[in-house]
Amino acid sequence: MPGFLEAIKKPFVIKRLKKEYKMLYGSTDTDAEQSLQRQLNYIKSKHPNQTEEWYLKKIIYDLEKDRSRGR
């Protein structure tokens, strides 16, 4: 039952990705949450119909890419 297992692990994956973003963002939890919400709103408008996991992974990828460029 892959659908059942996916449904069980999805909330944990989302929580882990949000925590990873907050650590990368490097500010208070409140600031990181507000930033993440702005990023989610923006990325959802650019790339509709993706999963929450996809959006979070994309945001983290972009943040890491920007940091490696020295921005």
Image: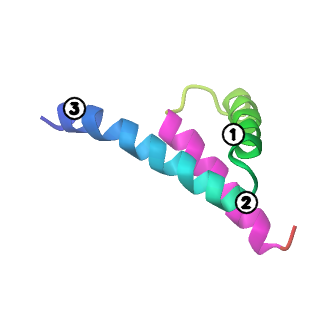
* Amino acid tagged 2: Gly
* Amino acid tagged 3: Gly
The mark that comes first in sequence, 3 or 2, is 3
Picture colour scheme: rainbow
* Circle 3: element type: helix
**Observer-nearest residue: 57 or 8?**
8
Front disc: 3 or 1: 1
Question: Is residue 55 rendered magenta in the image?
Answer: yes
Mark 2: few/some/many CA within 10 Å (<14, 14-19, 20+): few
Above or below, 45 relative to 16: above
Question: Is residue 12 rendered magenta in the image?
Answer: no
Above or below, 49 relative to 13: above
Front disc: 3 or 2: 2
Q: Which image quarter is the N terminus in?
A: top left
Q: Is residue 22 left or right of residue 12?
A: right
Q: Which residues are magenta?
A: 52-69
**Observer-nearest residue: 34 or 54?**
34
Mark number displayed over residue 3: 3
Mark number displayed over residue 26: 2
Q: Residue 55 appears at what percent x and percent y?
A: 58, 40
* Amino acid tagged 1: Glu
Residue drawn 57% across the image and 44% down it:
56
Residue drawn 70% across the image and 33% down it:
37
* Circle 2: element type: loop
Above or below, 65 relative to 22: below
